[in-house]
Every structure is written in C-alpha cells, then in structure tokens.
Image (spheres, grey):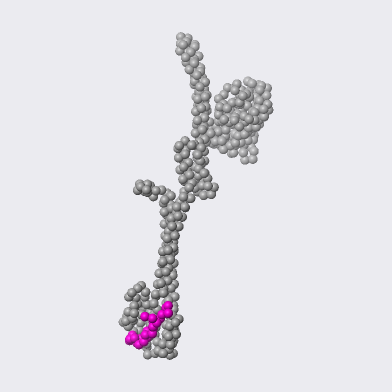
Amino acid sequence: MSLKRLRNITRTLGFRVGAWYSAIFIGSSALMFVLAYLFLGATLRSQDYEEIRLELREVQTLYDIGGVSALNRYVDQLGSERRSRPLFIRVADRDNHTRHIFSQGSWEDFDLTLLSHGCSDCQGWQTLSCRKGTYVLDVLSGPLTKRGNRVQVGMSSQRRQEILSQFRRIFLVVMIPLFALGLGGGLFLSRRTLRPIRDIIKTVRSIDAGTMEARVPRTRTGDELDELAGLFNSMLDSIHGLIIRMENSLDDVAHDLRTPMTRLRNVSEMALREGGDPELLRQALEKGIEESDRILSLLTTLMDVSEAETGMLRITPRETDLTELIETIVEMYRFVAEEKTVEIDATIEQGLVASVDPHRLSQALANILDNAVKFTPEGKRVGITARRDADTVRIDILDAGPGIPSEDIPRIWDRLFRGDRSRSEKGLGLGLSLVRGIVAAHHGEIHVESREGEGATFTVILHP
C-alpha cells in the first residue's frame, strides 16, 4: 500500500470514527485495569497493616503476661501456620537497643540495623527496603509495660507484591484480545454507522453517471442517518420531478409555439410579397401583433403553471372579502353568458372573509367559471355557490355541459390536455393546471365531480 493511499485512508471519516472508538475502548479498559490495580494494592496493604496491628496487640499482651518465654512459645506455634507470611518480632529497651529478636524465616535481605537507629520512643510505622527485590518490610512499633521497653512487629510485602505481579501479568494477557476487540469493534461500528453515508455517496455517483432513478436504501431504524436518507430521497424525488416538468414545459412550449410562430411567419412573408398594398400591410401587422400576443400569453401562462407546480408561485395573501370578489367575477361573466343565452345563478353567503391573494384567486375562479359558461349549451344554467363550511370556505361551480369522461378526470389537470369535446374551443389547455397550482399555493383543495351528459361540478375549499 502506497504512502499516499494510506494517508488518504487516515483522512476518511470511517477511519477516524473507528480510531476514536478503538482508542476510547482500549483506553477505558486500560484505565479500569489501572484503577483496579490501585484499588487491589490499597486493599492488600490495608489488610497487611490490619494483620500487623492485630499481631502487635497479641505480642504486647503475651509479653506483659509471660515475658520472653511466652513470645518464644507463640513464635514456635506460628511456625507452621505462617510459613507463607512469616512475622518479624523485635523487643528493644528504652534506648532502642535490641533485647530480643523472634523471627520466622530469613531476613538477611533487609538492613535490620536501621531499626536501632530510630528514636527510642518512636511509635508508628517504619518501612525497610529489600536489598534484592521490590519487597519491603512493614514494621509497626508499640510500647511494653515492663521497664519501658517497646516491641516492633513486621511482615514482608512479598505476598502482596506477588499478587500484584500476577494481576499485572493477567492484565497484559487480557489486553491483547481487548486490543483486538477494540480494533474490530471500531471497524464494525464505523462501517455500520456510516453505511447510510456510503449509500448516499453511491447514490450520488449513480446519479452523476446518469441513473436519475437511483435512491438511497432506508434502514428504517428511525435514527438521524435514516432520517437523512429519507430527506435525501425526498430531495431527489423533487429534483427529478422538477427536471421532468422542465422537460415537459420545453415540449409544451415547442408544441404550442409552433402554430402561432408559423402563422406569424406566413403573415410576414405575405406582407413582403404584397408590399405595395397599404391595407394588406396593415392587416399583416394586426395579425402579427395578435399572434405575438398569443405567444406572450402562452409563455406567461406556462411560467405561472411551472411556478405553481414547483411550489414557487408567488402570492401576496391579505384579508379579502370573498363575497365581493366572487360577485365581481359573476357580474363580469354575466355579459358573456347573456350572449350565449346562458343564465348564471349565484348563491353567495355574505361576510365571507379569508386571507388570499385576490388577483390569483380571481384568476382561478374566473378560469373555472369561463369553462362552465363555455361548455354549457344555450338556454341552460350555470350555478355558483359560496358558503362557510365549518372552518373552511367552500365554493362550488356547476355547469350543464357534456360532462367529463371518467377516464379523463385525472388528466384534466395536466398541461395542454384538452378533451375531445373541447378541441373545437379556443384555448391553450393550461387553465386547469394553473387553477390547481393557485389553489395549492393557498394551501387549499380543489375537486371535480362529473358524469358524461350531466355536467361537472368544481369545488374549491379554502382555509381562512
């Protein structure tokens, strides 16, 4: 493995997570062993000290009762009982000169003369170091009642040190598998934890290679990384939908601009051929302006529909009297309806108020009402009702037209969709797409109910 590749691996998040976990695990294990070692050492030392204190009291009692002979009998009695932990007993006079020494085993490794150099009335603990090892001789001094003498009882720390040494060996043996466990656990944890991130990277690479349908697999664990994967998938779905709508918009623009652009070109060519007739030129200019207006209207509507479908339609909501707004639209279309001898029957509840964009909402309602009048036969009636329904405002627009086939109802909201009965009517096929976008921008709902031959009912529900 090259040095550059190794350096790149050490910079990865997975390596750092695994390294941190391994370091914390191994460090925590080592700290626990150290604390246990210190606790064990302190406990063993405390036990040794307590045992020496008990022996000191026993020796003081025996000496006060039976003197030297009693101590000899006591030491002989302990010979078989304390082979592994022999005692050292020293009796000194008031000037700290050694009078008697009672001992089990050999104490050559300790400089016992140091006990004679201390003060004659000193009480408490003394520690003598071993010449050949790490052991020490713990000695406790205490007074005797006879002649001002004192006694010293000591015990080697060899057994204590052997236990601690064995504990250290166990620690070293246990740390090897613990080290391996820490590294393995760190690797497993980093791979498992960062799997969603690797899935995201893999998905992004797939998308970069052209697979726009690629998505991040969900773990369904409900944790933050699973939520991130879900949000990332939702973002990809939105982007994919936006791209498809952009492609459709381009197709729509190309499809619907072809006819007016062709007409504009034909009018211009005809004007060039017949350039001597002023009246013909004037008519050509009028037709050119008409076609350009048609193109501008198409582009404006397409832009509004695209903004509405992507949730970017800009609205300026304010408190609006819906009763007055709907009545204004109805009065405007009465003139159009009268030309077709179609009657508009309006039942509008007074005092309807909601926070809406009056311009955009008027555009949507006018579009629906325009279609209702357009497709209602002569002599028939168009109905519009507006009322408060619980905590919403409900607006219904009914027509007596030919109705909408059931298979076409889901498609009427698509851009440029025109049913068979509407192909003979003028229009861009963009109206209902824009209507749905405007209602959605107001966080409202729009539904349609229709049967062939029985007209259609469009329902707009707004949340004040």
Q: Please name the residue shown 48% across and 37% down the image.
A: 211
Q: Please name the residue shown 58% across and 22% down the image.
A: 426
Verify whether residue 136 appears in magenta.
no
User: Which image quadrant: the C terminus?
Assistant: top right
The x and y percentages for residue 7 are: 36, 48
Q: Which span of residues is magenta-colored?
A: 83-106
The x and y percentages for residue 263 are: 51, 18
Q: Kindly indicate the quadrant of the structure image that contains residue 54.
A: bottom left
Residue 281 against residue 448 in the figure, above or below: above
Lateral position of residue 427 relative to residue 175, left or right: right
Verify whether residue 99 appears in magenta.
yes
Q: Please name the residue shown 61% across and 23% down the image.
A: 336
Residue 174 against residue 46 in the figure, above or below: above
Residue 47 in sight here: yes
State the residue in front, 371 or 92.
92
Lateral position of residue 173 relative to residue 388, left or right: left
Q: Please name the residue shown 64% across and 28% down the image.
A: 404
